[in-house]
Image (cartoon, grey):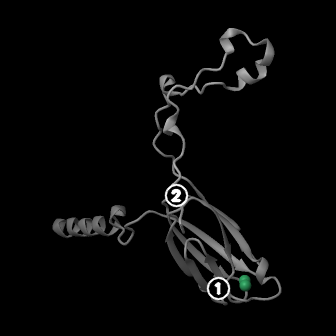
Amino acid sequence: MATRILYVAALLAVLLDPARAPGEPTAFRSFDITASRFQYEPARLEVSEGDAVRLTLRSTDTTHGFGIKELKVEAVIPKGGEPVTVEFVADQPGTFEFFCTEYCGAGHRNMTGTLVVVPRPVAPTPPPSPSSVQTAGGGREAKSASASASPASRPRAASGSPGGGHQAIGAIGN
Ligand code: CUA
């Protein structure tokens, strides 16, 4: 009697364990999108660069499509409401138009939306140290000072100008 209760309890524990949900290796950014003549709802999506994106697309009327040229995404959304899933990685930042790829009537060409892929913040680069900033001789101040120039604003002689002038590289066709 007692062993049977223990057995049932153990079985329940296995079956109900929430950590045992299989089949989700990646964390997707998931969106449900409804397509209808001639719009998407929502018409604007925002994700971060590098996100794995999963779109579940449904049509409320006729056959529509869903395409993002730059990210090579394309799907047909069948009429009747059957969902279609599209998965892709938003591997480049930017603002991309998505659009209907199946002719669906007079407003087909205007059936568009926007996917914004926000760039991932890059590792901060160290600010340039003051000593490395080059001071170019004869800057703006020297010009505006003109005739009443104080000795301090005298343009510096360019010592060791870089490159020493461009060399003409052998003209082609001679
Ligand atoms: Cu919707 Cu074409």
Q: Amino acid at mark 1?
A: Gly
Q: Position of residue 108 (x, y in %)?
A: 77, 83
The answer to whether residue 41 of the structure is visible from this angle is no
- The Cα–Cα distance between marks 1 and 2, rounded to whole angstroms, is 30 Å
Horizontal arrangement in the rendering, residue 93 relative to residue 27 (left or right): right
Q: Which residue: 50% across, 63% down?
A: 91
Q: Position of residue 76 (x, y in %)?
A: 61, 86
Horizontal arrangement in the rendering, residue 154 relative to residue 5 (left or right): right
Q: Position of residue 169 (x, y in %)?
A: 50, 55
Depth check: 172 or 113 in front? 172
Q: Which residue: 53% across, 65% down?
A: 172
Badge 2 density bin: few <14, some 14–19, many ≥20, Cα 10 Å? some
Mark 1 Cβ and ligand 1 under 8 Å apart: no
Q: Amino acid at mark 2?
A: Glu
Residue 81: image tag = 1
Query: Which quadrant holds residue 65?
Result: bottom right
Q: Secondary structure at mark 2?
A: loop
Depth check: 115 or 21 in front? 115
Q: Which residue is mark 2?
A: 49
